[in-house]
Amino acid sequence: MNQTSNRGTEVPLEAVQQAFNTLRRIKTRLAERGWFPATSGNLSVKVVYGEASVIAITASGKDKAVHTPEDFLLVDENGVPVAPTELKPSAETLVHTALYRKFPECGAVFHVHTVSNNLVSELYGDHGAVTFTNHELIKALGHWEEGAGVTVPIVPNHAHIPTLASAVERVAAWDSRGVLIRNHGIYAWGEDAFAALRHLEAWEFLFEYEIKRRLLMSR
């Protein structure tokens, strides 16, 4: 694959391979949890070289439980592949680029579909957000103070991806580390892949807790 970007600057092959390897590790870990049903979900990491950057992202329509040489590709800040390729970036690439644009410090964005995050998004969708307090896992989202709370916004599941991307960008706050899309899934991010994974796992724990808590209370 030609690694020359649309800027005409060559992206170092070593940096690309490192980004693809990172995505492969994350993809394996999340696929084992069943967080990519029916080829859903998408992952991306930023590839920085000099003063420039591109985005390594999962290709569309791939079974994320299987590894192939064509699982990932590079796109620019507009979601356009940086080199000729038959691969298509994720259909929701514009959501990723919107988050990278809003948060220059962002190094990775992960999106998964789970039963828990769908249920929570539906239960609290009319409120536009859901807040969790007094949970140990909130520390994983960067909130260490006593009795801390953290809020994740919820946006409608717009079929028009540019509209969806704008909605996510509008409500996203760095400190929340996530945005829920109603009956769709969550986008979580961080300064690097390790942080984004930590934030994603923390949110998913809180979502599962909330569903089980409500079930127990209803008995």
Image (cartoon, rainbow, N blue to C red):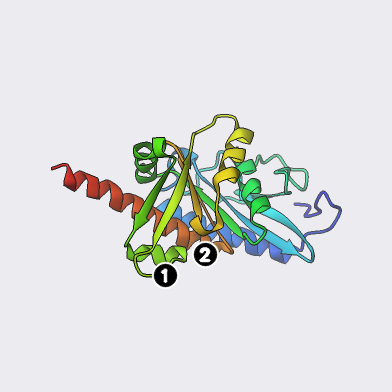
Residue 195's disc number:
2
Q: Nearer the viewer, residue 35 or 160?
A: 160
Q: Residues within 10 Å of mark 2 (few under 14, many from 20)?
A: many
> Could you tell me which secondary element the residue under label 2 belongs to?
helix
Q: Residue at x 67, y 41 (%)?
A: 87
Q: Residue at x 59, y 30 (%)?
A: 160
Which mark is first along the chain, 2 or 1?
1
The quarter in which the C terminus is drawn is: top left
Residue 32 vs 147, above or below: the answer is: above
Q: Nearer the viewer, residue 78 or 105?
A: 105
Left or right: residue 81 versus residue 112 is right
Q: Residues within 10 Å of mark 1 (few under 14, many from 20)?
A: few
Badge 1 vs badge 2, beta-carbon distance below 8 Å: no
**In the rendered structure, which amino acid carries the disc numbered 1?**
Trp
> Could you tell me which secondary element the residue under label 1 belongs to?
loop
**In the rendered structure, which amino acid carries the disc numbered 2?**
Ala
Which residue in the structure is indicated by mark 1?
Answer: 144
Residue 193 vs 79, above or below: the answer is: below
Q: Nearer the viewer, residue 40 or 96?
A: 96
Q: Residue at x 40, y 35 (%)?
A: 126
Measured from the top left, where is residue 122 in percent x and y?
37, 36
Measured from the top left, where is residue 159 in percent x and y?
55, 29
Gap in Å between the C-alphas at discs 1 and 2?
16 Å
Residue 47 vs 180, above or below: the answer is: below
Kindly give the residue lying farthest to the left in the view shown: 219
Residue 172's disc number:
none
